[in-house]
């Protein structure tokens, strides 16, 4: 069984007010070309299909064109997509049952009532059955009717919610299983502060969204989304594929690609290959004096850091823009090493949780949990 693993398309993304639709179209066309060449049986996208909960018409059209061209190129391909924290689950679920008849499974919401279970798609190859479990992004408040509460009556954490959701499922002993999920998984004992997070991600206050990766033991492959930098989580078959193209300046220099997974006979490790993707334009950070910077003009998306030269010149910005038509930002490095925007002041905000607690006063733990969930909902809908 061969399938592609992607995530975090973020269709509709604007990078420092620049429309990235042409760049995203370029990447999606490469995915289609790779699919034609490799002939996978399935393609999974592990969340954050769109950059906004209410995507633009252009972003939805881009998704429609991608899925249409992909399924035209491979009529027998099974497409599986889940909602992420940037997506609106109910919107992703629109026309879900109609699309399913066309081998396109778009699942926006996790189980929210006792009678619902994680959506399962079953495929078959020469080695038997492969079950794909499609688990969209989970907030504890979404699934409280399904997972219940703790013994003391308080709400379950992210970790407890995921564990209880998976514990309800029946996983056939002889079949191979794949989990598609969009959460922040960490190996047991790992420090969440050591995970490199990108500017374009929406981290949860206090890293309360972390889930122990030991809950993923037993799956033949785990296709993860949410973290933008490609990485494994303790084991080679538990993997964040990363974004197919850089979504922020903090992702400059990262090599992006499609993860191709081949499942063999039950009990054998999967064969995993990264198929490189080439962006329409690179995102680059260039440091140097004014003279050094101007000598490196290019069509790429560039963040310029000036370290010397005549940074006070009246015509400096026009000269830099002429050298870099797709300029993103210009910053000046001060003597003490601090960075100052030349054209834009970036305001560093106080921790949102601390700001709210200072305003509201003393809060009980349950009240803090509710507040954290509200903050996450607001941040995810930006």
Image: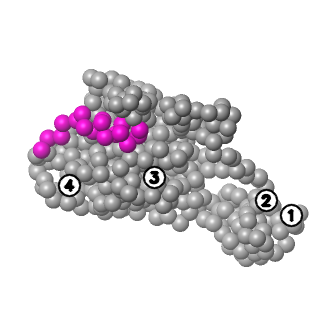
**Sequence-first disc among 4 and 2:** 4
Mark 2 vs mark 3: in front? 3
What residue would you read off at disc 2? 342
How many residues crowd around disc 2 within 10 Å: few (fewer than 14), some, or many (20 or more)? some
Drawn side of residue 154 relative to residue 235, left or right: right
How far is disc 3 from disc 4 in space, using C-alphas? 24 Å
Part of the protein shown in magenta: 157-173
Q: Position of residue 95 (x, y in %)?
A: 38, 26
**Sequence-first disc among 4 and 1:** 4
Q: Quadrant of the C terminus?
A: top right
How far is disc 2 from disc 1 in space, using C-alphas? 12 Å
**Sequence-first disc among 2 and 3:** 3
Q: Position of residue 117 (x, y in %)?
A: 27, 30
What residue would you read off at disc 1? 315
Mark 2 vs mark 1: in front? 2
Disc 1, SS: loop
| 259 shown above or below 9 | below
Drawn side of residue 231 relative to residue 332, left or right: left
Residue drawn at (73%, 65%) of the image: 338
Drawn side of residue 190 relative to residue 374, left or right: left
């Amino acid at each position: 069984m061969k399938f592609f693993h992607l995530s975090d398309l973020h269709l509709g993304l604007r990078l420092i007010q620049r429309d990235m639709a042409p760049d995203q179209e370029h990447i999606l066309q490469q995915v289609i070309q790779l699919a034609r060449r490799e002939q996978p049986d399935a393609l999974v996208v592990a969340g954050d299909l769109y950059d906004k909960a209410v995507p633009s018409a252009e972003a939805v059209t881009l998704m429609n064109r991608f899925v249409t061209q992909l399924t035209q190129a491979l009529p027998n391909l099974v497409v599986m997509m889940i909602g992420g924290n940037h997506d609106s689950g109910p919107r992703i679920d629109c026309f879900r049952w109609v699309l399913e008849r066309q081998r396109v499974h778009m699942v926006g919401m996790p189980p929210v009532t006792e009678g619902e279970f994680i959506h399962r798609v079953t495929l078959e190859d020469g080695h038997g059955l492969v079950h794909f479990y499609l688990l969209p992004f989970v907030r504890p408040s979404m699934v409280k009717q399904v997972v219940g509460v703790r013994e003391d009556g308080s709400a379950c954490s992210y970790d407890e919610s995921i564990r209880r959701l998976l514990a309800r499922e029946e996983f056939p002993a002889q079949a191979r299983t794949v989990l598609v999920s969009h959460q922040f998984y960490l190996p047991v004992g790992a420090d969440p502060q050591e995970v490199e997070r990108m500017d374009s991600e929406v981290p949860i206050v206090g890293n309360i969204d972390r889930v122990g990766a030991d809950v993923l033991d037993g799956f033949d492959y785990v296709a993860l989304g949410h973290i933008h930098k490609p990485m494994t989580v303790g084991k080679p078959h538990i993997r964040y594929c990363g974004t197919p193209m850089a979504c922020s300046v903090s992702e400059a220099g990262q090599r992006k690609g499609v993860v191709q997974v081949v499942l063999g006979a039950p009990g054998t490790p999967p064969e995993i290959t990264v198929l490189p993707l080439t962006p329409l334009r690179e995102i680059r950070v260039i440091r140097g004096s004014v003279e050094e910077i101007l000598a490196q003009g290019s069509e790429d998306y560039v963040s310029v850091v000036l370290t010397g030269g005549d940074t006070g010149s009246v015509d400096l910005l026009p000269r830099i823009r002429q050298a870099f038509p797709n300029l993103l930002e210009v910053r000046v490095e001060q003597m003490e090493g601090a960075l100052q925007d030349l054209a834009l002041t970036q305001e560093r905000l106080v921790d949102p949780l601390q700001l709210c607690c200072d305003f509201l006063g003393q809060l009980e733990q349950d009240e803090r949990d509710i507040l954290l969930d509200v903050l996450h909902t607001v941040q995810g809908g930006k």
